[in-house]
Image (tube, rainbow, N blue to C red):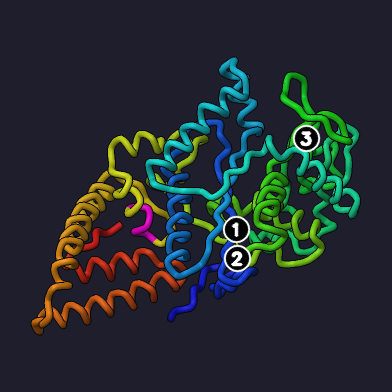
Amino acid sequence: EYRIKLYDTLSKNEKELEPVEPQTVKIYVCGPTVYDYTHIGHGRVYVVYDSLKRYLSLRGYNVLHVMNITDIDDKIIRRARDENRSWEEIVEEYTKDYLDGLSKLRISIDHHPRVTDHIKDIIEFIQQLINKGYAYIAPSGSVYFEVDKYEDYGRLSGRLEKELWSQEQEYLSEKKKPYDFALWKAAKPGEPYWESPWGRGRPGWHIECSVMSSRYLGDRFDIHGGGTDLIFPHHENERAQSESYYGRKPWVSIWMHTGLLMVGADKMSKSLGNIIPLKEALKKWNPGTLRLWYLHVHYRKPLNFTDESIEQIDKLYNRVIAAHELLRKLIPESKDLHYLQNQDLETVKELLVLHTELHRALSDDFNTPQAIAVSVSYTHLTLPTS
């Protein structure tokens, strides 16, 4: 039996999956900030971790998969102001879009914590970081994490030079160092706020995931996932504040990151205006086709979007489904056979090899393109190129 190995962004090596709790794998994936429609780049992240969860379940693990919903953030507030709507309306509209997309892609999340339901937990976490000397209160009532107090900062992202760490430029005047980051943001006029020991305000982005992941998965868990674009500063900051809070390492055993979805030479992003909403893609293509398209390139590599590439995968998907349906029909009939022809025996041998090769591929850093290629070779299909 092949031992499962996954590439760990922190160590820059493949690591064998050794769950903190035997036979249970705990996964936290950074979910959406619900200020706009979910696009197909987000869909890739969600499908990759759902597929990994399915494979781990196949291998006999109990899997607990948590993905948050960030329902308060600068971008949400800005959109509400621009459209003269309440931030709650913005959150409701785009959360529904996100959940509809997951449903159509047949993705099931075990728990979906929302930031605004965890304000009390977040405040307590921040207070403990202040008590331990890792955070300080600015005159405005904002609270910042003091990066210099955490000696291992920068190793996850590989940004080891301090001049690369500058964050949140508009708050430079009240931070001890440019690279300190906000745990709690003092409320500005007209913004939503919650009461705290430091005054009215709301959580910073990074603290939210530290608190919610640990609340539901424990103070040490197996896999923390997300897109490559979250390594810095989001995951770097999560790691710093969580390991400071718990006073030990590692907080997470394996840091996994999916590659970006590209349109030509650019990444798909809302800021560039080149997004394709997931709901539009799901009107045009079968959900199964999209899932197969996401997985036909290794999860750590960039995935280039073209209509042609998805159309090729759609043809492959339909042929695979036809082959699968034929197998479903033949298997019950074969049970009544008491003598197998030589050709049938050869088929059985090939299927056993296929089973082995599938596990070899999926155990080796979840190599789905290799697994697909092996499957295709045994059904006499041609795998389209990316």
Q: Secondary structure at mark 2?
A: strand
Q: To which quarter of the image does residue 275 belong?
A: top left
User: Which residue is rendered at x = 69% and y = 46% of the image?
Assistant: 206
Q: Is residue 174 left or right of residue 16?
A: right
Residue type for callout 2: Ile
Which residue is at the front of the view, 37 or 268? Answer: 37
Q: Is residue 276 visible?
A: no
Q: Are marks 1 and 2 in contact (CB under 8 Å)?
A: yes
- Report, in whole angstroms, how far the alpha carbon at label 3 lies from the one at label 1: 25 Å
Q: Position of residue 85 (x, y in %)?
A: 59, 17
Which residue ends up furthest to the bottom in the rendered image?
342
User: Which residue is rendered at x = 52% and y = 33% of the image?
Assistant: 95
Q: Secondary structure at mark 1?
A: strand
Which residue is at the front of the view, 143 or 306? Answer: 143
Residue type for callout 1: His
Which residue ends up furthest to the top in the rendered image?
84
Region rendered in magenta: 293-297
Q: Position of residue 254 (x, y in %)?
A: 60, 65
Q: Quadrant of the C terminus?
A: bottom left
Q: Is residue 76 left or right of residue 142?
A: left
Against 324, is 117 above or below? Answer: above
* Residue placed under numbered mark 3 in the picture: 185
Q: Quadrant of the N terminus?
A: bottom left
* Residue placed under numbered mark 2 in the picture: 254
Q: Position of residue 99 (x, y in %)?
A: 47, 38
Residue 224 shows which numbered tag?
1
Q: Is residue 334 visible?
A: yes
Question: Is 321 within the magenta?
Answer: no
- Of badges 2 and 3, the one in the foreground is 2
